[in-house]
Image (cartoon, rainbow, N blue to C red):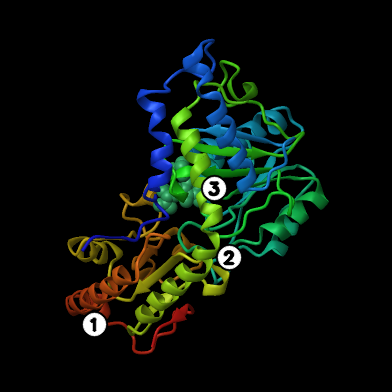
């Protein structure tokens, strides 16, 4: 059996999404900016797709949703343009992010530090969550931007974006949220909270890879990162990825339709899976379930290196991860585990299982059996587990 439980890394393209994209490769392949029928054949589908993306996050018409190539581009755009507009000009000198943002935010912030920008890395608490009240202490009159993700990609933890948005609005600071892991897993409505910029990526909600978006509130339009032609109102130049945009629109529509199912049925499946995993002695989960999106589990099996567990799972046809796919080759311990101050031997044992609306009960039953076997085998040969102190308290949510 093949089981895909790495949906926070990427998702299968929904067959209806694929079907809608297909004509734009070999039939309607015109450049939308050209002046002929091949071009105009793309106009209505593009308009419909953009309407679906706006509707999916409840963005009003006067705000901008600009299509990019991925969330990494959207995140780079916000931080670098804020640097150009506010910091390079000397008006401000400071941005605030969390210490567990995706590398596309952290690496950009670190780069901006080399250019003289001051960066505060907000800590997470023992549950892997940012506490909004801590933000107040760090905002100064030189702070240009707060960039905090809506949902953490490693743990699935929901961050308090409403409170953070309110604090930023009160203090007159721009607020960006990376909502890549939120779309399709929790309601995202840009009109119901204070947000200036919001990042999305289609391949995280059963759309195609290579297409993302950046939402910008009216009046907050950023200077372009990509200069060139007049596409996207001149905000993001480059020939439009027609098939990608059509796919993203359909995927957004499907994600919104399936949200209820995700928040009930997939949550139940995830919870049952987690209950079974936590029956294994010396297993730990960082963030409590009610503070997480419905599809994610980051779990540690004491004494078992994450990579060793992945090896056993992969041999049995199961795809999971030790955390963010971008960092999977460096064999570092999981950054969230490090940030919560987990003991060194636990920090290397984290495994991320991320479900989707395509995950079935049979797949989860099979995975439970494979994990039980893997734990038995790997702990049997683990020197660190043999010497683990009996009943040692890790401070995390614990199995029996
Ligand atoms: N996270 C993961 O395994 P792109 O690939 O640029 O569309 O998405 C980047 C990105 C940005 N923000 C968050 C919160 C993300 O989770 C990701 C992608 C994957 O967790 C791959 S590293």
Residue at x-position 77% and y-position 48%: 140
Mark 2: give few (<14), some (14-19) or many (20+) Cα within 10 Å.
many
Left or right: residue 190 versus residue 141 is left
Closest to the camera, between mark 3 and mark 1, is 3
Q: Position of residue 16 (x, y in %)?
A: 42, 45
Residue farthest along the top direction in this orientation: 35
Circle 2 SS class:
loop
Residue where numbered disc 3 is placed: 253
Task: Pick the residue in front: 389 or 234.
Answer: 234
Mark 3 / mark 1, whichever is N-terminal: 3
Q: How many dots with numbers?
A: 3
Q: Mark 1 against mark 2, which lies toward the viewer?
A: 2
Residue 222 image position (x, y, % from top left): 67, 31
Q: Nearer the viewer, residue 327 or 340?
A: 327
Q: Is residue 57 above or below residue 237?
A: below
Give the labeled residue for mark 1. 386
Q: Is mark 3 within 8 Å of ligand 1?
A: no
x and y percent of residue 379 in the render? Answer: 22, 78
Label 3 to label 2: alpha-carbon separation: 29 Å
**SS class, disc 1:** helix
Q: Earlier in the sequence, mark 1 or mark 2?
A: 2
Q: Earlier in the sequence, mark 3 or mark 2?
A: 2
> Where's the C terminus, which quadrant?
bottom left
């Amino acid at each position: 059996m093949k089981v895909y439980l790495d949906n926070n890394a990427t998702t299968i393209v929904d067959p209806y999404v694929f079907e809608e994209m297909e004509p734009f490769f070999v039939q309607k392949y015109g450049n939308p900016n050209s002046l002929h029928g091949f071009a105009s054949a793309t106009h209505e589908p593009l308009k419909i797709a953009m309407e679906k993306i706006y509707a999916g996050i409840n963005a009003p018409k006067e705000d901008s949703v600009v299509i990019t190539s991925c969330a990494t581009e959207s995140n780079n755009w916000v931080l670098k343009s804020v640097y150009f507009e506010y910091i390079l000009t000397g008006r401000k000198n400071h941005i605030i992010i969390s210490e567990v943002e995706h590398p596309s935010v952290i690496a950009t912030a670190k780069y901006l530090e080399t250019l003289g920008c001051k960066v505060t890395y907000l800590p997470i608490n023992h549950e892997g969550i940012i506490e909004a009240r801590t933000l107040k202490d760090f905002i100064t009159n030189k702070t240009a931007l707060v960039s905090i993700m809506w949902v953490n990609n490693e743990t699935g933890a929901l961050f308090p974006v409403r409170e953070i948005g309110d604090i930023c609005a009160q203090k007159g600071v721009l607020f960006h949220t990376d909502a890549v892991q939120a779309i399709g897993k929790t309601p995202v409505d840009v009109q119901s909270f204070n947000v200036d910029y919001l990042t999305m990526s289609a391949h995280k909600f059963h759309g195609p890879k290579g297409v993302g978006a950046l939402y910008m509130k009216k009046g907050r339009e950023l200077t372009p990162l990509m200069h060139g032609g007049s596409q996207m109102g001149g905000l993001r130049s480059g020939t439009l990825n027609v098939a990608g945009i059509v796919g993203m629109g359909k995927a957004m529509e499907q994600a919104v339709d399936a949200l209820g199912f995700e928040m009930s049925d997939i949550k139940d499946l995830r919870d049952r899976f987690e209950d079974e995993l936590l029956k294994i002695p010396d297993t730990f989960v960082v963030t409590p379930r009610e503070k997480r999106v419905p599809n994610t589990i980051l779990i540690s099996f004491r004494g078992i290196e994450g990579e060793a567990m992945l090896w056993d799972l992969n041999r049995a046809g199961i795809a999971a991860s030790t955390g963010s796919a971008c960092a999977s080759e460096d064999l570092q311990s999981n950054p969230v585990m490090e940030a919560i101050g987990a003991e060194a031997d636990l920090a290397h044992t984290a495994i991320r299982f991320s479900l989707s609306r395509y995950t079935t009960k049979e797949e989860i039953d099979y995975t439970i059996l494979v994990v039980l076997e893997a734990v038995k085998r790997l702990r049997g040969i683990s020197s660190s587990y043999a010497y683990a102190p009996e009943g040692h308290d890790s401070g995390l949510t614990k199995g029996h």
